[in-house]
Amino acid sequence: MTLFDDLRDCCRPNVPLAPLTWFHLGGPARWLIEPRDEPQLITVLHRAREAGLPVRFLGLGANVLVRDAGVDGAVIRLAAPAFQQLEWTTDGARVGAGVHLTKLVRACVHAGRAGLEVIAGIPGTVGGGIRMNCGGRFGQMSDSIRRVRLIDRDGRVVERRRDELGFGYRKSQLGDAMVVSAEIELRPTDSRALVERFKEIWLAKSRSQPALEQQSAGCIFKNPDPQRFAGRLIDECGLKGRRIGAAEVSPIHANFIVAHPGGRAADVIALIEHVEEQVYSRTGVRLEREVEVW
Ligand SMILES: Cc1cc2nc3c(=O)[nH]c(=O)nc-3n(C[C@H](O)[C@H](O)[C@H](O)COP(=O)(O)OP(=O)(O)OC[C@H]3O[C@@H](n4cnc5c(N)ncnc54)[C@H](O)[C@@H]3O)c2cc1C
């Protein structure tokens, strides 16, 4: 009898994670868990806690690099229909944490509801976007968050307002809780003007980075401060185009590392460490990672 024998519909052992991340690299999860709904998520969390099994949450894997050895624990994904709802309210929307950001942003733009267009072109899910407070020079996810519904590791449901979530530059303070849904604030606006604004932001983003289809995790490092960009520092150290194995510092945007076909997560990790060392020895700046290495 194994830990999740009676939950085989949602818990699968030894599942490769590479196809579930944007980098398309790394080994399997000891357990991949895709709960049907909130009660089943709570059951799984209780079971993992009792067994002392480490748990991680995965969205679209757009900010995660999984090591070649994989994850010796449970990885939970909110891929089931129960976590994909999008329901309009008078001044916003209620969305499930598994909803893809690109789909949500487009739906808001086409409905003439402004706010989330500032994150156009950023891949991920609502849960991962909140956790990372994703964004860029046009704005960030937290600007549109009113309230978040969370389930903590003990299976307790809690609701938090935006000002209780500790949002900052590419961070939040959710503790060890999983986002299951969120209430978003949106402003009704002229839909044609909003479509134009969306296109402008989307184009600006796609021109400044490698193609979305390339294997990457977006920016590898946080900017040391608002005036000092990590990409510029890496570029000034002459590291654009630097390669280790199949991993390359993008010639288009120095804060992106792209993995070419046939690579391993170890190549990317070695290149991240190389960039960290080079930037520190040449500029004295210790770069902080934005990407999570699992
Ligand atoms: C081509 C490309 C461009 C990018 N551009 C940008 C950009 O401009 N700005 C930017 O900020 N980011 C950017 N990123 C990074 C990425 O898109 C964001 O960090 C995004 O928020 C990740 O969402 P995700 O669902 O894929 O999260 P994942 O990568 O799956 O997970 C990221 C973190 O969120 C946690 N998490 C996931 N789901 C949940 C949940 N339901 N509850 C609690 N925690 C959860 C994970 O445990 C992990 O800690 C880019 C990535 C790529 C590949």
Image (tube, rainbow, N blue to C red):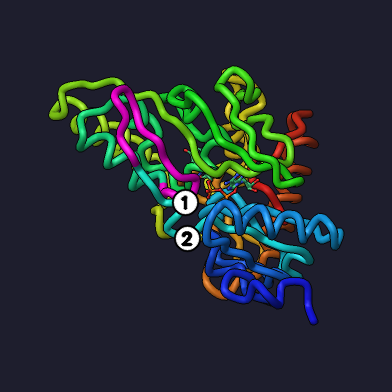
Asked if residue 280 shows in the view, the reply is yes
Residue 157, position as x, y percentages in the image: 64, 39
Q: Amino acid at mark 2?
A: Ala
Name which quarter of the figure residue 104 lies in.
top left
Q: Residue at x 56, y 55 (%)?
A: 61
Label 2 CA crowd tier, 10 Å (few <14, some 14–19, many 20+): few
Q: Amino acid at mark 1?
A: Phe
Q: In front here: 117 or 221?
A: 117
Name which quarter of the figure residue 137 lies in.
top left
Magenta residues (range) = 87-100
Vertical comparison of 29 with 141: above or below: below
Q: Are marks 1 and 2 in contact (CB under 8 Å)?
A: yes
The residue under label 1 is 83
The residue under label 2 is 80
Name which quarter of the figure residue 219 lies in.
top right
Lateral position of residue 245 relative to residue 137, left or right: right
Q: Residue at x 57, y 63 (%)?
A: 34
- Ligand 1 found in image quarter: top right
Vertical comparison of 42 with 264: above or below: above
